[in-house]
Image (tube, rainbow, N blue to C red):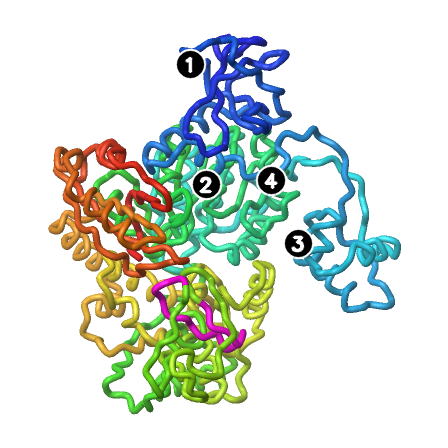
Amino acid sequence: MDDYYDEGTLISVLTTQPLDRLLDYKAPAGGCAQGAFVEVPLGPRKVFGVVWGPGQGGFDPAKVRGASRVLEAAPMRAELREFLERSADYTLTPRTAMLRLATRAPGLGEAPSMRKIYRRGDSVPERLTDARRRVLEVLDEMGGLSLTLKELADAAGVTSSVVKGLAKLGAVREEEAPRDTAFARLDPDYGGKALTEDQAKAAEVLRAGVSSGTYGTVLLKGVTGSGKTEVYLEAVAECLRQGRQALVLLPEIALTSEFLTRVEARFGARPAEWHSGVTVTERRRVWRQVAEGGAQLVVGARSALFLPFRDLGLTVVDEEHDTSYKQEEGVLYNARDMAVLRASICSGRVVLASATPSLESWANADAGKYERLDLVSRFGPAVMPEMRALDMRGEDLPGSRWISPSLQAAVKRRIENGEQAMLFLNRRGYAPVTICRACGHQIACPHCDARMVEHRFLQRLVCHQCGESTPKPEKCPSCEVEGKLAAVGPGVERLAEEAAEVFPDARLAVLSSDLFGSARQLKAEIEKIAMGGADIVIGTQLVAKGHNFPNLTLVGVIDADLGLQGSDLRAAERTFQLMRQVAGRAGRAEKPGTALLQTFQPEHPVIRAILSGDEEGFWKAEADERRAAGMPPYGRLAGVILSSTEVQEVFDLGNAMARQDGPLRRIGAQIYGPAPAPIARVRGRHRVRLLVKAPKGVALQAALAEWAGQFRLKGELRMAIDIDPQSFF
């Protein structure tokens, strides 16, 4: 066979080392297949890589070293190798970096073996110390998943002797288990729900698409609470019946707990999980079982798209508009777009689900590239919330307060009725700026051109760009006067402080990503709120992402104008999406909901569109503006960020790139810049941006590669090219 190489044959290997080229080796003893994972010598080290094809030759064969051995892992399929190649070409990323994304599992080359694992036992010890209680809580939170001794001890913050002591008492079960066992089989006919008429029609279209075995993308647009999940789970069921694998991408780890419960209720078993909250042991198991066909369904974050599926038949991108699908560091890619690319290669289907789709997906459906299915009503007795603006110009509100009298009265009514209210502010921390009232100094990050944000719960100032954290000073670092530092502007912590004063008897819960040490803690808090453990929920955009709080009937948006400021291309779109998504948390059960938006600009077109619910009108107007300006999705953009520890270096390179723009001019592209990035220094590195704008149908990547290839980066200079940038910081 053409794709098998006998011992000693010249093979080319792609490693995960930062070399960005294929390396020639001789096939190891016993030969190897194309796509095989092999261990090869590289200098004094041994590294692993994938057999990419026949050797390239062109040099003395006597100098070629032999591959050491073939690793015990299923060979990488041609479909995944093509996906990595095409992703690398699209994003202008080295293939070695793409391979690292596809091999994020430890111990891939280790032979299968037995190991001790620990699960929850049946008994509870008579003496339940704090350390023992933490171990049992971790096992309960893991939902039946097994952990190694080290993983369990580390997660609970105890010594291994505590775990072993519980094992002796029967509260924890210690078992011998083979590594990397297959996941329990999911039954597509186990627990289907009765669907409404429009849900059933949409599900039938999705099922037909999956059973056809051909590529296609569907935009599943449904108002919040309309049952999009139940509809696309029917497509998953059909995929399982066809014997193919399915992948569901979620934008937030905190959403997985509730979602996994729904999957288990539908299919009788839990699927595989893949995200940063999963243990190292479980990651290795998922990676292997996906490759061997022992995992039928994976639920995960964006990186799950690079798993070695044996036969991927369906990919669902839930909340497809969410910006967290765009990776902003390292390899710059958008998981929504890459999901469509991978499905086109493996003849799979894609379902893009959202109540407020991205303009890109809306335009693709409008142009007929994607099929579109609409769910127009909420499931069961729930109805869409009433939406109203609170004109802050007419509210009598002191300068130090943020909750208007009208919103305050509405929240009180909800609490008196035994219902929940949510206060939404898309700003983490206590206050965005700390200023000295004596000299006017604003405390900035020492490594970035960004203000330090006060986090009063932590008693620290934090930089939201680089993560730098320092204790809150007693005196001004500039004039050294004590007692004059003042917090300016609101964050969710300050809002929580105000809410505690205004509603002294209410139980408050604050949901912000930086207040929880682990994904498990965040999941537990969300579950507690859903069970009625709080009267008022205060949160950032984290609360907008698909959570279901049945007793929540009021959403108050503290500053609906916040996202409308600045020059971001997608400011209007993102504000519209966020406000509609947040409002959609209200009235998801039998009691009707209300959303109140505090705004100083009730006449603003975006605010008017949010309140009227004229979504199609909004998208058409936004599309017309972008089309007239030649902006995405009706034109193409690429961002170029140059950075260095020396500011002059980056400007010199940026100016040289702007002058030598021949390859870009030939395709009709324009360059804007160089200009300091909006945050011009991050982690001590000065940053300069160039923006490249090109017509829709041109070969932008090839021109960018030729243009960037003219310049050699020396010393501390770095260049990052972002195709289809989502943010402009």
Marks 2/3: CA–CA distance: 27 Å
Q: Nearer the viewer, mark 3 or mark 1?
A: 1
Q: Which quarter of the figure has residue 678?
A: bottom left
In this rendering, the answer to whether 511 lies above or below 3 is: below
Q: Are marks 2 and 4 in contact (CB under 8 Å)?
A: no
Residue 142 has which mark? 3
**Which residue is disc 1 drawn over?**
56
The percent coordinates of residue 278 (x first, y second) are 60, 49
Which residue is at a point 26% across and 70% down the rendered structure image?
Answer: 611
In this rendering, the answer to whether 519 lies above or below 309 is: below
The percent coordinates of residue 333 (x first, y second) are 37, 43
Is residue 300 visible in this depiction of the protein? yes
The percent coordinates of residue 716 (x first, y second) are 37, 46
Which residue is at a point 42% across and 28% down the rendered structure image?
Answer: 346
Q: Earlier in the sequence, mark 3 or mark 4?
A: 3
Q: Amino acid at mark 3?
A: Met
Q: Confirm whether the magenta stretch covers residue 459.
A: yes
Q: Is residue 245 left or right of residue 639?
A: right
Q: Confirm whether the magenta stretch covers residue 342.
A: no
**Which residue is disc 2 drawn over?**
235
Task: Pick the residue in front: 385 or 395.
Answer: 395
Which residue is at a point 36% across and 66% down the rendered structure image?
Answer: 450
Q: Amino acid at mark 4?
A: Leu
Q: Nearer the viewer, mark 1 or mark 2?
A: 1
In magenta, the rendered stretch is 447-462
Task: Pick the residue in front: 43 or 212.
Answer: 43
